[in-house]
Image (tube, rainbow, N blue to C red):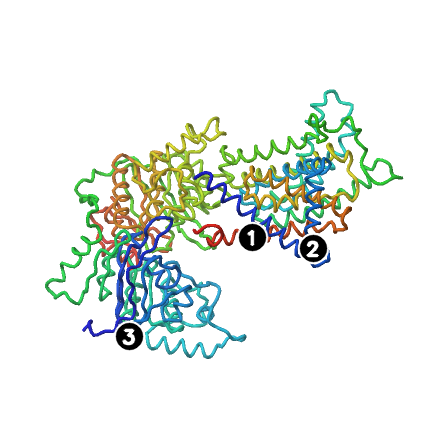
Amino acid sequence: MSEMRETVIEMRGITKRFHGLVANDCIDFDVKRGEIHALLGENGAGKTTLMNILSGMYHADEGKVYVRGKEVTFHSPQEALRSGIGMVYQHLTLVPTLSVRENILLGTNKKFVLPKRDVEKKIKEIAREYEINVEPGVKVGQLSAGEQEKVEILKLFYRGSEILILDEPTSVLTPLEVDDFFKILKITSDAGKSIIFITHKLEEALSISDRITVLRQGRKAGEIDLQSFSQETKCEIPETIVKMMFKEAEFVEEIENIACDKPSLSDEVVLNLEDVTAKNDRGAQALKRVSFSLHRGEVLGIAGVDGNGQKELAEVIVGQRKVSSGRIFLQGCDITNMPVRFINERGVFYITDDRMKEGCVGNFSLAENAIFRSYKKEPFCKKKAILHIEAIEAHGNELIKKFSIKASNAKVMVRTLSGGNIQKLVVARELSHKPVVLVCNKPTHGLDVMTTQFIRNEIRRQSRQGISVLLISSDLDEIMQVSDRIGVLFKGELLDILPRQKATKENIGSLMLGLKNKVQA
Amino acid sequence: MKLGIVVKAVLGPLFAILAALLVGGLILFFIGLNPFRTYFELFKLGMGTHLGITESLKKMAPLLIISAGLIIVFKAGIWNIGGNGQFLIGAIFVGGLAPLLINGSSPYLYFFLLALMGFLGGALWIVIPAILKAKYEINEIIVTMMMDFVALNFTAFLVRGPLIAHPEYFPQTRLIPVGQRLPFIPFTRIHIGLIVGLAVVILAHYFMKKTTWGYEFRLLGENKKAAQYAGVNIKKVTIIAMLISGGFAGLAGANDILGIKGAFQAEWNPGYAFSAIPLVFLARFNGIAVIPLAYFFSFLAIGGEFMSRAANVPVFFVQVLEALMLIFFGVTEYMQKKGKLFWKS
């Protein structure tokens, strides 16, 4: 049946270089009418670059693009839009203070007075046809990430896009929202529109798409038509794809079953929170009387859906946020509301969830980024005043080697590194100081499989050497894989803490969604 | 490799200067002047005569000293726009105190104390904006600028009131005798302020690059959240960076009183800081690059002044040139980012 469909997009031999680095190497790609085509690959495989070429953001160095059989050259996203190609970027591009209607009009309206009624009519039509239910008058800032994603799609429909490019649309969504979102995609493709779905999550690609193209290191590693598999051969698909994605790449050893190798919980309490309450940036209560103790050498996982106080919990412990009531003790020493450096010098280190805006400085070299915690210490400076450049660079190079960060040397600007390598740098920096307590907030968020596994292994290994880890994450798999004990944060309250053996995905999941607040013993 | 970076950095300002001269030439042409002759006069008077060179180099000193402070504070991401007010306060401190210190023992101590006074005066004038910025996050651009107006009127009051030397003459502070002013660099008529200026601007450059303080300042300027994460005491660093920059502006005031003027005169407001700000931007906050640009700026000012007398060109023509340079610098920045000028990104 798929052979009968008309090919709407055809890309032939696309090559794109950045500063001598080949991002896309002679890639062929096509999309048929009414098809969901997943573009799968690790971070930095060239997925987004390829789609940026299609959407007019970049210009290909070599290769041709055909839309409905006609060769085209786009010089801007506007030109691509006119040909019916619209892209939703990974980081949403809506204006939070404007309403849904105004956001949709943005950039398309040519009238002096906003044509409120026309727009509303059209939005309603689209909403009915594709079952996207959004109130046009609401400010976008009040919508959840999932609803905002819908508005982005609505915007493209309004502009008459026939081909939608979605760049990792699910990375900001909760599991429930993902299901809802996928329903919309199905309806859309059934209505004859084509969808290109960029992702690095295999399950998602398998569950939603008709075809999967796998990219690896800028090259096309293969293409799979899911329809061509019979019910019996279907189970082979994941294996085939994994092979495509990591053909010669070394596999990182899987973490062995934690339940087996786990020594009994140490009696020594390293970090202790007593009734900690704190506000978020908007002044609303973010943490409500949170109490727990972290023991030596354990990984305490804190699960929870994003925005339930995770960030605030981490910041309160490391001293970046004030506690409004309650106490925090580190090895018996009261560190409540102490400055960041005071707490840090007593052994608390922090892997932030915002590696780009908080964990590093893009315009600093790798070496300079590696001394955030130690620039006032020997050997990186003399007498706390003069920086010792050679020692700093040597330290940077050492981290590159030890954590296999992909950078030519320690002098490169961090902004030129990929997200995974920046995260490795952050992890390397925090671990290189032999922490007593390591606070991690979403340490593998948005990273490829290899780096994710590497970081999880590293956290595991460090905890076995006596470091206590507080692992905050919304990724349930991660929590289950790495933690010794698991607690759940829901609306700022810490619900039950369970030993790993008693935790199942179901009972943790229901705690995360607030369906229960205790697991019956 | 390293050379390539330098060439790249030089091309932008160079293009801006040439484009400004070109458009400035057109303006001259339209107001009925011969652009070639005017520019020839400008360069001849500013760079080709002994007097022009000496005056230009003298004028460099305050620009360099103010720039040294601006490099530090701008790199820390703080916009001290009120350098002019800090300059005036530093100057009036020195103008008021120098006559009282003249009979002191050693000239070294005398100059040191006065330099310190100038520095403290400038620093004092930024204390309020610094505290407001650090404690309450009040925008320093507005507060420093407002403090500039206060300084202008406050110094006018002082020089006409408590500090006036002879009430019946033109209002100014007591004149410092020529023998008590800054000595000349040997074999020239340029006072040693130029050496001080070169020294502080180079010092500021390496201070930012090679010290832990400089590291903290840059960290704060690049990314405040990361600075907080790294444990930098943001309030302290903000205040220190601002005090340093205010202090240098005040030091420049001391330099002008002790090197050139000899007294603080009413209506005197050279506005160096307003040239130093664009200058530091043109130099991309690089202390070494500030030096040639400071020379070019002071050459323009001096050449323009001489030329206005000789060739009937309005004095503010050089200000038009300065403004054009900045506009074109903005254009080159934009084009270089887009990779459309001189090389592909």
Give the structural element (helix, strand or loop) at label 3.
loop
Residue position marked by numbered label 3 in the rendering: A192
Residue position marked by numbered label 2 in the rendering: B28
| Extreme-top residue of the structure | B105
Amino acid identity at mark 1: Gly
Q: Quadrant of residue A88?
A: bottom left
Q: Are marks 3 and 1 in contact (CB under 8 Å)?
A: no
Q: Return the mark for residue A93.
A: none
Closer to us: A27 or B234: A27
Tag 3 subunit: A
> Taking A69 as reference, is B138 left or right?
right
Which residue is drawn at the image coordinates 50% and 54% (left, top)?
B335
Residue position marked by numbered label 1 in the rendering: B330
Label 2, label 1: how far apart the Cα atoms are: 23 Å
Q: Quadrant of residue B286?
A: top right
> Taking B186 as reference, is A206 left or right?
left
